[in-house]
Amino acid sequence: MKIIHIINSLKKGGAEGNLYRLSKNHKKKYKKNIDITIITLIDNGFYELELQKLGIKIFSLKINDRGKFFNIIKNIFKL
């Protein structure tokens, strides 16, 4: 099973905490039969390292990089 979540960031907050717990429980329940990818608009965050330790792929569009409009477009196409 493949799951993709799209979220603003993985900084400390309510929605991010719920996404972390949901992803952690899915990985525990389905083990190797699940592939979770999280797409963030802003890079880096409190939960990013913990999710990567669980084997969850994190892809950031990095829209917080001011003045790098073409990099944002490039990341969207890469996605």
Image: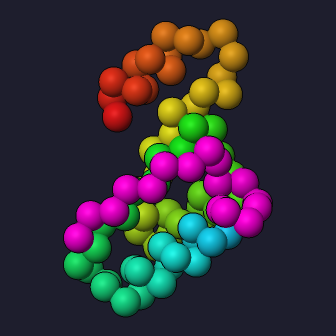
Q: Quadrant of residue 29?
A: bottom left
Which of the two residues, 57 or 38, is positioned nearer the viewer here? 38
Is the image coloured rainbow, by chain, by secondary structure, or in one colour?
Answer: rainbow
Q: Position of residue 2 (x, y in %)?
A: 27, 64
**Is residue 51 rendered to the left or right of residue 79?**
right
On screen, residue 63 versus residue 34, left or right, reads right
Tell me if residue 30 comes above or below residue 6 in the rendering: below
Measured as percent of width and height from the top left, residue 19 is found at 57, 67
**Residue 46 versus residue 16: which sits nearer the camera?**
16
- Residue 24: x and y in percent read 50, 79
Q: How many marks?
A: 0
Residue 74 versus residue 48 in the image, above or below = above
In which image quadrant can residue 40 be found?
top right
**Vertical relation: 76 (above or below) 42:** above
Identify the residue shown where x is 63% and y is 38%.
42
- Side (left or right) of 44 relative to 31: right
User: Residue at 67% of width from left, 69% of height from top?
Assistant: 17
Q: Please say whether residue 27 is one of the residues in the magenta stretch.
A: no
Residue 79, above or below 67: below
Decide if residue 44 is on the left or right side of residue 1. right
Residue 31 picture location, percent across and down: 31, 84
Looking at the rendered image, the quarter that the N terminus falls into is bottom left
Q: Quadrant of residue 75?
A: top left
User: Is 10 a magenta residue?
Assistant: yes
Tell me the quarter of the image containing the C terminus. Answer: top left
Q: Residue at x 48, y 73 (%)?
A: 23
Residue stretch in magenta? 1-16
Q: Residue at x 69, y 16 (%)?
A: 66
